[in-house]
Image: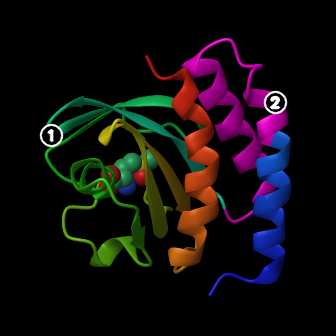
Amino acid sequence: MVDERRLGAYERIYAQLEGLVAGKSPNLLAAMSTIAAVLHAKLKHHFWTGFYFVAAADELHVGPYQGSVACQILKGRGVCLRCAQTGAPVVVPDVEAFPGHIACDSRSKSEIVIPLKKNGRVVAVLDVDSDKLAQFDDDDSVPLQKIVDLLVPFLP
Ligand code: SME
């Protein structure tokens, strides 16, 4: 259960990002960079915040992000690929318990991944890692999806 403080923070962040991105960002990468920067700066439980693009059926390539240096290519397994392949958010309270999890930074302990879809097809995912266990649950998915969906008008 996500606490009220975090839900309030999501609402403020959405309003801020809507003002910064909708009708303002010049392109998709600018909008993604702005979303990653604001989420990462404002939400203290975020250890890594960023995007991966779907490059092939089993391969993702890193996009704009904030945090420690990331894996540039994710292939064949992992939490982000699960989200890209199912089209649904994935919540992982303990990354060690997720078979096939890819550890780009061993300090990451829990994770949430949200899809960005165009016409039902996943084109990218938002990945958020925390350095503490069990930092995300299904209550995070709805406000994060609303933020990710600010990107839909920028998709080609
Ligand atoms: N843990 C992810 C890889 C990306 S990093 O966490 C930044 C995964 O299993 O797909």
Tag 2: amino acid: Leu
Residue at 65 percent across and 39 percent down: it is 36
Residue 98 spot, x, y in % from top left: 27, 72
Label 2 CB-ligand 1 distance < 8 A: no
Report the disc number at residue 145: none
Residue 102 spot, x, y in % from top left: 29, 54
Report which quarter residue 46 is drawn in.
Answer: bottom right
Viewer-nearest residue: 61 or 125: 125
- Residue 87 in view (yes/no): yes
Q: Secondary structure at mark 2?
A: helix
Viewer-nearest residue: 90 or 79: 90
Viewer-nearest residue: 6 or 86: 86
| 2, above or below 91, in the image | below
Residue at 32 percent across and 74 percent down: it is 96
The reply to whether callout 1 and callout 2 are in contact (CB within 8 Å) is no
| 96, above or below 49, in the image | below
Which residue is tagged 1? 58
Mark before the other along the chain sequence, 1 or 2: 2
Q: Is residue 136 left or right of residue 31?
A: left
**CA neighbours of label 2 inside 10 A, class few (<14), some (14 to 19), many (20+):** some
Which residue is tagged 2? 20
Residue at 69 percent across and 65 percent down: it is 45
Residue at 40 percent across and 36 percent down: it is 52
Tag 1: amino acid: Asp
Q: Is residue 15 left or right of residue 155?
A: right
Q: Which residues are magenta?
A: 17-45
- In the image as oriented, which residue stretches furthest toward the bottom? 1
Report which quarter residue 89 is drawn in.
Answer: bottom left
